[in-house]
Each structure stands twice: as C-alpha cells, then as structure tokens.
Image (spheres, rainbow, N blue to C red):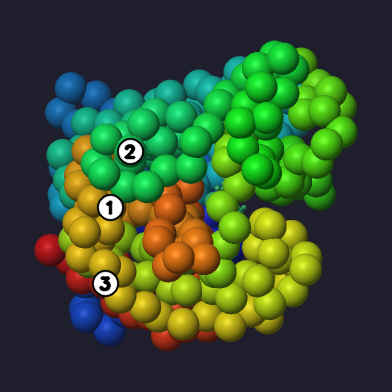
Amino acid sequence: MILVVSHAGDGHLPAVTAKLDEAGADWVLLDTDLYPEPIRIDDGPAGCCLRMDGREIRLRDVRAVWWRRPRPPVITGRSPEVTRWAQRQAFAALDSALGAVSALWVNHPRHNRQAEDKPANLRRAAALGLDVPDWRVTNDPVVAAAFAAGHETIIVKPVEAAYVTPTRSLWTRRLGDSGPLDHIGPEPYLLQQFIDKTEDVRVTVVGTTVFAVAIDSQATTETSVDMRAGDLAALDHQPIELPPRVASALLLLCADLQLQFAAIDLVRDQDGALWFLEVNPNGQWAWLEQLADVPIAGALTRLLMT
Ligand SMILES: Nc1ncnc2c1ncn2[C@@H]1O[C@H](COP(=O)(O)OP(=O)(O)OP(=O)(O)O)[C@@H](O)[C@H]1O
Ligand SMILES: [Mg+2]
C-alpha cells in the first residue's frame, strides 16, 4: 500500500493520485486536517493501525510513503498553550508510528529537516564541484560590510524560510550602498554574491530522474532579482537538458541528503555557467508541469509504485 501523508487541499495531490488510480495502485490519504479527529491511531508492540474513513490501515502494509507537506494536527476548543502542547502530543504519536515504517520514503521528514540546512547544503554542493556563489551568514554589520566590499553586488536572503507570515515574505533583495544589515534586525541573514543572471533554472529530482526548466526571470523588473516577487506564471518556462556534470552532481547531492525528491534552484550567468543556490526537499513542482509540460507527476507515481 502507498500512504500519502498530506492534506486534501494540497494542489499537488490530484495529478499523482489520478495516476495512481489509473495504474490500479492501492493508496490511501492520511489527511492531517482530519487528525487527531476523526482519525484514530492505535500503536502498540504489534505495530500501528490507523482507523480512518471506515478503513483500518496497518502501517506494516505500507510499502511507500509520499510525505507531501502535511499540516499540523488540528486541535480545537483548548487554550493556545494547551493547543500547542496537544498538537505536539498528536504529532509525536504519529511521527513515532510512521517512523517505524520501513518503506520507500519520499522523503522522510527527518531527511527533509536535515536538507533544510542552507549553509550545510552550500558547502555540500561546493564539495561536489558545483559552482556556488560566495556567501556569509552573519548578524555582524562589520562582517557584512566587509563581505559587501569584496563583491560587486550582494544579495540578502533568509537563512531559513522566506515566508514571515501568511501575507508577508522576505524575498531575495540586492543590497545597495545603504550599509548592509543596518536596517534589518539582530537576527542573522544569508548574504550572497549576486549572480548577474540570464535565467533561473528550477530542477526537480524524482528518484534518479532529473527534470530541468529554464525560467525567463529577466523578462520583467519585478522578477529579475527574486522571480517569486512578480508574476512567475507569466514568465516563459522551457524544459532544458542540464550538462551531465551538473546533473550528476545534483543526483549525488540528493543521495547524500537521502532525498528521493528535491526541487533545486540554479541560476545561469552571462557566460552560460550554472550556479547552485539551494535545495528544497519538499518544494513545489505542479506549476512546472503545467507551464513546461515536464512529466513530474508520472515520475513520482512510478517511484511510489516501485
Ligand atoms: N546569489 C544570487 N544571485 C542572484 N539571484 C539570486 C541569488 N540568490 C537567490 N537569487 C534569486 O532569488 C530567488 C530565490 O532564490 P533562493 O531560492 O535561493 O532564495 P531563498 O529565499 O533561499 O528561497 P526559499 O524561500 O525557497 O528558501 C530566485 O529567483 C533566485 O534566482
Ligand atoms: Mg528557493
């Protein structure tokens, strides 16, 4: 059985679940919006059973897990503190039960967490021979100023997530002459050498298959530094082949991080060279399939069915 751990509203599910149905696969959705109620968990020495939708799912029957951005357990009617505690309690029980499942994980949340370490990934990518823009993580204005002085242009971006609140994001920005870090706060930021790019390249790795899409981010001013800051869907998207050296380094990086799936951001400079920016272990890909016709859902379906 294939277990999809997600929530029913995730826009990435239908393309894959329709293909699983077509192929006659036995799959079930663990919808975290329905956990811990009405879903019931029963874990013990003999293994774990989930009761949901009138079905009993024995986790030892699970052969593959697609961990597609599940949401936190839903607890209602308690104080905010107790809600957080109860959510952790519910998550711990599920996490432990799922953790005992020896299946093909796409991807295991432990590996996702590990792969969210941006500085570590920049070091890993460089060690694999990929071109990586020079970078610093710092909250020291003196260090930031010295770093800026050493490069024509630098950018600032978050060390962790760009989404500050549901309505506010910290997009990648170029730093001008106004003194880096003077106006942003005591928390450290990731500073990076700015790559004067001709396009963004989004790579999706599924198992050992690599899909690359070139995105014409330079077509509009708003998308020219951070392509997410403007209308990304309006930009031209073209499937491309990566140079074999880059594709194999990215596969090695995913193997290193124990990721079956990854969304990787690259940029192409004025000389045609590709630079590694980051790896997103649970990144978005449905828009690439829609705009560039890259068969990612099919590849994921086949991977889950192996
Ligand atoms: N060093 C850089 N030079 C030029 N452009 C960059 C650089 N770093 C990031 N960008 C641009 O900013 C955008 C986001 O890049 P990236 O994914 O690295 O940022 P992030 O904030 O770390 O992302 P996430 O929110 O996914 O963690 C992309 O359009 C990318 O081309
Ligand atoms: Mg990114």
Q: Quadrant of residue 241?
A: bottom left
**Crowding near the residue tagged with mark 1, few <14, some 14–19, many ≥20 C-alpha atoms within 10 Å:** many
**Crowding near the residue tagged with mark 3, few <14, some 14–19, many ≥20 C-alpha atoms within 10 Å:** some
Q: Which residue is mark 3?
A: 299
Q: Quadrant of residue 112?
A: top left
Asked whether, in this view, residue 55 is left or right of residue 237, the answer is left
Label 2 or label 3, whichever comes before in sequence order: 2
Label 1 or label 2, whichever comes before in sequence order: 2
Mark 1 or 2: the one toward you: 2
**Crowding near the residue tagged with mark 2, few <14, some 14–19, many ≥20 C-alpha atoms within 10 Å:** some
- Determine whether 249 is above or below 35 in the image: below
Looking at numbered disc 2 in the image, what kind of residue is underneath it? Ala
Residue 242 image offset from top left, x and y in percent = 30, 69
> What is the distance, in whole Å, between disc 1 and disc 2 at their CAs?
11 Å
Q: Quadrant of the N terminus?
A: bottom left
The residue located at (57%, 24%) in the rendering is: 137
Residue 177 image offset from top left, x and y in percent = 83, 36
The residue located at (74%, 17%) in the rendering is: 141
Looking at the image, can residue 48 be seen? no
Q: Which residue is mark 1?
A: 250
Residue 126, label in figure: 2
> As rendered, which of 118 and 144 lies closer to the eye?
144
Residue 103 image offset from top left, x and y in percent = 17, 45
Label 1 beta carbon less than 8 Å to ligand 2:
no
Asked whether, in this view, residue 226 is left or right of residue 24, the answer is right
> What is the distance, in whole Å, between disc 2 and disc 3 at their CAs?
28 Å
Mark 1 or 3: the one toward you: 1
Q: Quadrant of the C terminus?
A: bottom left
> What is the distance, in whole Å, between disc 1 and disc 3 at their CAs?
17 Å
Looking at numbered disc 1 in the image, what kind of residue is underneath it? Leu
